[in-house]
Amino acid sequence: MNYLVISPYYPQNFQQFTIELANKGITVLGIGQESYEQLDEPLRNSLTEYFRVDNLENIDEVKRAVAFLFYKHGPIDRIESHNEYWLELDATLREQFNVFGAKPEDLKKTKYKSEMKKLFKKAGVPVVPGAVI
């Protein structure tokens, strides 16, 4: 299994997740902006490969990095960042590379609390009243 972690160094408390994936024999690949040398040693040791990009906000640069890792290691089975900021990037990459998980069209119902409330109400779960501002 090839598991791609976007920005594997942040948040720091999620580095252990990457380390444990590697301990279970999963091929863990990383893409991020930090130099490889700046990664904590246990994290470095758990990554099969790390591809540094200049800017994670540059979707084309990140797609090229994913394409390289795909070419070198085979299909990517999962993509995750463990960071809400990168939800859209994760979803876009999953769609582009046909990876299991939430795609851009799925994000509306989880990213926006107002949309989540609609789903909860539909399921009969009580919610606190609110308004979109």
Image (spheres, grey):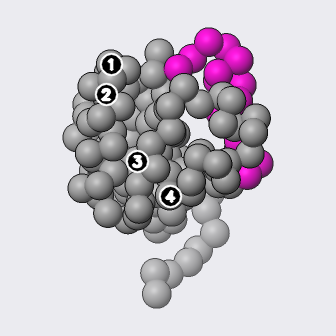
Q: Are marks 2 and 4 in contact (CB under 8 Å)?
A: no
x, y (%) of residue 34? 56, 57
Mark 4 residue type: Gln
Q: Nearer the viewer, mark 3 or mark 1?
A: 1
The residue beneath circle 4 is 33
Give the crowd class for mark 1: few <14, some 14-19, many >=20 residues within 10 Å. Answer: few
- Kindly check if marks 1 and 2 are in contact, taking CB atoms under 8 A apart as contact: yes
Kindly identify which numbered label has been placed on residue 70.
2
> Disc 4 or 1, which lies upstream in sequence?
4
Q: Secondary structure at mark 4?
A: loop
Residue 133: x %, y % from top left: 46, 87
Q: Nearer the viewer, mark 4 or mark 3?
A: 4
Q: What element does badge 2 sit on?
A: helix
Q: Which mark is residue 90?
A: 3
Q: Label 1 sits on what residue type?
A: Gly
Q: Which residue is farthest top?
A: 25
Which segment is the magenta one?
12-27
**Alpha carbon of mark 4 to alpha carbon of mark 3: how far?**
15 Å
Q: Secondary structure at mark 3?
A: helix
- Name the quadrant containing residue 65: top left
The residue pinned by badge 1 equals 74
Please tell me whether residue 28 belongs to the stretch shown in magenta.
Answer: no
Amino acid type for the residue under numbered disc 2: Phe
Which residue is the extreme one toward the bottom?
Answer: 133
Mark 1 → mark 2, Cα distance in angstroms: 5 Å
Q: Considering only order in the chain, which callout, 3 or 2, is on the residue closer to the N terminus?
A: 2
**Majority secondary structure of the magenta segment?**
helix
